[in-house]
Image (tube, rainbow, N blue to C red):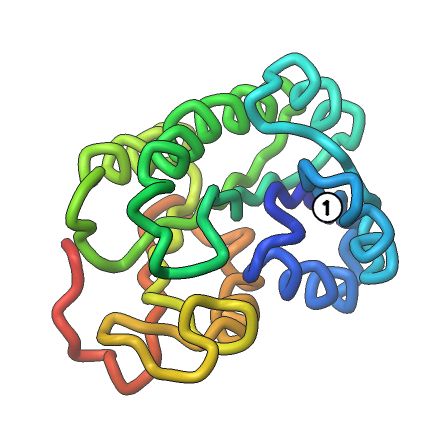
Amino acid sequence: MRIFLAGASGVIGSRLVPLLVADGHDVAGMTRSGGMAKPLGDLGAEPVICDVFDLEGLTNAVVAFRPDAVVHELTDLPDSLNDLGEYGARNDRMRSEGTRNLIAAATAAGATHFLAQSIAWTPSRGGEVVEAHEQMVLAIDGVVVRYGQLYGPSTFYENEIPPQPRLQVDDAARRTVPLLTAPSGIVTLVDSDESRAPLRS
């Protein structure tokens, strides 16, 4: 399968690339940072330098790759949890305009599968943006993956375990792979010990 992965240099995306390549898929790894082209190439992806907010450039890039599936692992988050509040509007824009643009590009390319990340908890702000983001994905028969709070290397919780709902980041990538061809709907991924934990409906 040909897979266009937006957010390929992120904490989940960078783990997804080698898993998908190892499964025999052709992967285009999109990042807005030119400095990530070589690392993505080293992982086996075809690097694509593009900004999701450049609709024309994004559409051209996705159409040129001819993907069967488009994966949306884009976020706009700080390096430190302490700065999270300052990035709220930026991440909202990624979930709204960014999602709309990526869906438009995937549709133009004729992709038959679309998967997008979301969150498994109710945020203190921006809940309506998360809901609208998920509904956009479901409206095109895509798959919404609600991840628990990620912990492990390169996450906000490298050396501690966050509150529930939570999910180890390598496990998040591994469990995402089979969802690429899952039926449209919402899938919640959390640690196995949280199977009975209350989550958002």
141 up-or-down from 36: above or below:
above
Q: Quadrant of residue 64?
A: top right
70 up-or-down from 187: above or below:
above
Q: Seen in the image, is 199 located left or right of residue 119?
A: left
Task: Estimate the x, y position of residue 90 in percent, counting from the top left.
Answer: 40, 34
Q: Residues within 10 Å of mark 1 (few under 14, many from 20)?
A: many
199 up-or-down from 8: above or below:
below
- At horizontal 78% and vertical 32% (from top left) the residue drawn is 65
- At horizontal 77% and vertical 49% (from top left) the residue drawn is 36
Q: Seen in the image, is 105 located left or right of residue 3?
A: left
Give 139 or 161, whichever is nearer the viewer: 161
Location of the C terminus by quadrant is: bottom left
Task: Estimate the x, y position of residue 76 in percent, counting from the top left.
Answer: 47, 42
Q: Which residue corresponds to mark 1?
A: 29
Q: Identity of the amino acid at label 1?
A: Gly
Give 37 or 191, whichever is nearer the viewer: 37
Q: Quadrant of residue 93?
A: top left
Name the secondary structure under disc 1.
Answer: strand
Task: Estimate the x, y position of residue 134 in percent, counting from the top left.
Answer: 32, 38
Q: Seen in the image, is 87 located left or right of residue 85?
A: right
- At horizontal 37% and vertical 83% (from top left) the residue drawn is 160
Q: Seen in the image, is 112 located left or right of residue 93?
A: right
